[in-house]
């Protein structure tokens, strides 16, 4: 059933008001513009053409008088003929201008002056014709006519034309003044109408805001508070008879239902938390299994294919193969076996360190870190003969306290990543030197690099760069690197640009075994 004070009714009133306001304002503006257009039409269609035609008439008549004098001063027949021809052309031009003037609209006063001008001009032309006839027989008499009767007739015509021109110019100026006044009047009246319309619009907006917008915003605020379980909120406006009243009453029902739902929500939240933990654990296990299967299927298949291929080659060519080729193929077989062995050891060690805690397997001894790095480089050179691994640091020993197995795995992971992410076979540098009380080890490559957005999470567990799709990996290598380096009291940093390569820098403190107590190791790991 339609309410007598519904929002639809309010909207209809507001839009009808705006429509009528636009119609009235448009009609008023058009009427003002019509008045301005009428005055401007008088200026454009009457006074401007009149002024232009009278200007031409003044120019032609003054030119005619000048040519008349030139005719009297001419002595050669050719000059006299030329001036008479110019007079004929000016007669035609003056006649055309007169026809143009007569086609325009004029007042009675202007027409009277124009008729007087034509009479005086015709008298003048008659005198000029008499003078021209005399000039052929009696030059002196013609000059006397030019200076007397011809001048008087011309002056009468010129003065009458001047009066007519002055009157038209005055009327044109008055029309221009009226045009400017009409424009100013229309400008201010339209501006006043717009101001009145703006006030009315503002009043309508205030009415709309107070009666509809403000109650809706208040209701929306209370709904937001109900959405965050604030059931103490009051809901006014239930007594209204329009749609807003219906909404407030519905909000009251929603509040009552929210109170009942809050009791069950706590129980559901607890159950959802338990389920979320179980789901996260299942997802983690599934991801680990998928990554392991993907990596194993690729990493194990490659060396096995190498072993199988070389074994078949040895079987087929056993009778004609040379000892040098046998040694070369045996070296490749050994490299494939080393690669599989290293992969198996790496997987087992990673699983043991992550699940059992690296501190339980931390057994520091006095080691030469340069020797460990050399072993790592030799191993990866044998596993990837095509890699260009360059060792820098000379033959000086780098003595410190550390776990050789864990550090071997740290630098093996860094070097393995450098080889893996250098698809073009660029040089890989392993640099080691002592700086004060620290040993600096840097592994640099010119591979695919690391996107800037991934650098902050690079050492997180299971995190891999966004540009390594299609390259197998578990996301555990750099996590283990940081774990072991922290266990040794050192630090690891990375400097990388996508497409230009990466540089991982490990800093380890120089110390003796007796300086490295298990308690200190556990404190470093926990921090």
Image (tube, rainbow, N blue to C red):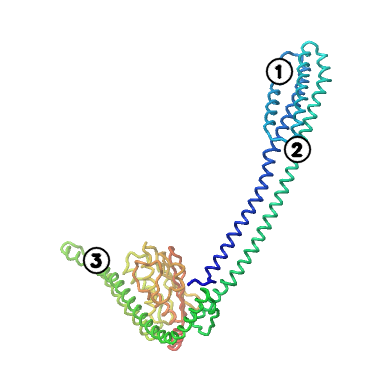
Sequence-first disc among 3 and 1: 1
Q: Compute the Cα span from label 3 to label 1.
A: 120 Å
SS at mark 1?
helix
Q: In the image shown, does 17 or 365 lie closer to the viewer?
A: 17
Q: Residue at x 55, y 76 (%)?
A: 218
- Name the residue tied to disc 3: 329
Res. 432 image quadrant: bottom left
SS at mark 3?
helix
Q: Is residue 393 visible?
A: no
Q: Residue at x 75, y 30 (%)?
A: 114
Res. 12 image quadrant: bottom right
Q: Where 35 sits versus 451, above or below?
A: above
Which residue appears farthest toward the left when viewing the image? 319
- Name the residue tied to disc 1: 82
SS at mark 2?
helix
Horizontal relation, residue 202 to residue 414: left or right: right
Q: Compute the Cα span from label 1 to label 2.
A: 35 Å
């Amino acid at each position: 059933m339609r309410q007598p004070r519904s929002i639809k009714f309010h909207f209809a009133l507001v839009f009808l008001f705006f429509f009528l306001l636009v119609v009235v304002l448009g009609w008023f503006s058009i009427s003002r513009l019509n008045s301005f257009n009428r005055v401007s039409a008088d200026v454009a269609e009457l006074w401007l053409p009149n002024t232009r035609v009278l200007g031409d008439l003044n120019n032609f008549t003054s030119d005619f008088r000048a040519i008349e004098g030139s005719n009297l001063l001419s002595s050669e027949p050719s000059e006299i003929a030329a001036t008479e021809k110019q007079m004929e052309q000016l007669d035609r031009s003056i006649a055309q201008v007169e026809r143009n003037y007569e086609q325009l609209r004029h007042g009675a006063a202007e027409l009277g002056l124009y008729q007087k001008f034509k009479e005086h001009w015709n008298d003048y032309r008659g005198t000029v014709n008499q003078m021209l006839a005399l000039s052929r027989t009696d030059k002196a008499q013609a000059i006397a006519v030019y200076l007397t009767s011809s001048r008087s007739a011309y002056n009468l015509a010129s003065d009458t034309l001047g009066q007519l021109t002055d009157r038209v110019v005055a009327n044109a100026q008055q029309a221009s003044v009226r045009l400017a006044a009409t424009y100013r009047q229309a400008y201010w009246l339209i501006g006043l109408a717009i101001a009145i319309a703006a006030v009315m619009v503002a009043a309508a907006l205030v009415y709309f805001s107070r009666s509809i917008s403000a109650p809706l915003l208040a209701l929306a605020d209370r709904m937001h508070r109900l959405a965050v379980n604030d059931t103490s909120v009051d809901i006014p406006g239930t007594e209204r008879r329009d749609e807003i009243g219906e909404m407030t009453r519905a909000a009251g029902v929603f509040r009552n239902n929210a109170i009942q739902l809050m009791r069950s929500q706590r129980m559901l939240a607890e159950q959802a938390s338990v389920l979320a933990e179980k789901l996260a654990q299942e997802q983690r296990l599934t991801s680990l299994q998928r990554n392991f299967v993907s990596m194993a299927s690729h990493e194990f298949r490659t060396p096995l294919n190498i072993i199988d291929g070389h074994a078949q080659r040895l079987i087929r060519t056993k009778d004609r193969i040379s000892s040098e080729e046998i040694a070369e193929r045996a070296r490749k077989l050994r490299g494939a076996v080393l690669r599989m062995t290293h992969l198996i050891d790496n997987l087992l060690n990673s699983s043991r360190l992550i699940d059992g805690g690296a501190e339980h397997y931390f057994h520091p001894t006095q080691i030469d870190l340069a020797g460990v790095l050399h072993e790592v480089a030799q191993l990866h050179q044998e596993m990837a003969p095509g890699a260009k691994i360059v060792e820098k640091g000379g033959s000086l020993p780098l003595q410190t306290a550390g776990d050789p197995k864990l550090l071997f795995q740290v630098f093996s992971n860094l070097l393995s990543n450098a080889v893996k992410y250098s698809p073009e076979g660029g040089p890989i540098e392993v640099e080691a030197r002592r700086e004060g009380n620290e040993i600096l080890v840097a592994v640099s490559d010119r591979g695919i690099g690391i996107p800037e957005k991934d650098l902050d999470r690079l050492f997180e567990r299971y995190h891999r760069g966004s540009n390594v799709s299609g390259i197998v990996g578990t996301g555990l290598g750099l996590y283990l690197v940081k774990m072991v380096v922290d266990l040794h009291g050192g630090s690891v940093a990375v400097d990388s640009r996508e497409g230009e390569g990466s540089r991982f820098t490990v800093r380890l403190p120089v110390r003796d075994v007796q300086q490295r107590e298990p308690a200190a190791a556990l404190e470093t790991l926990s921090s």
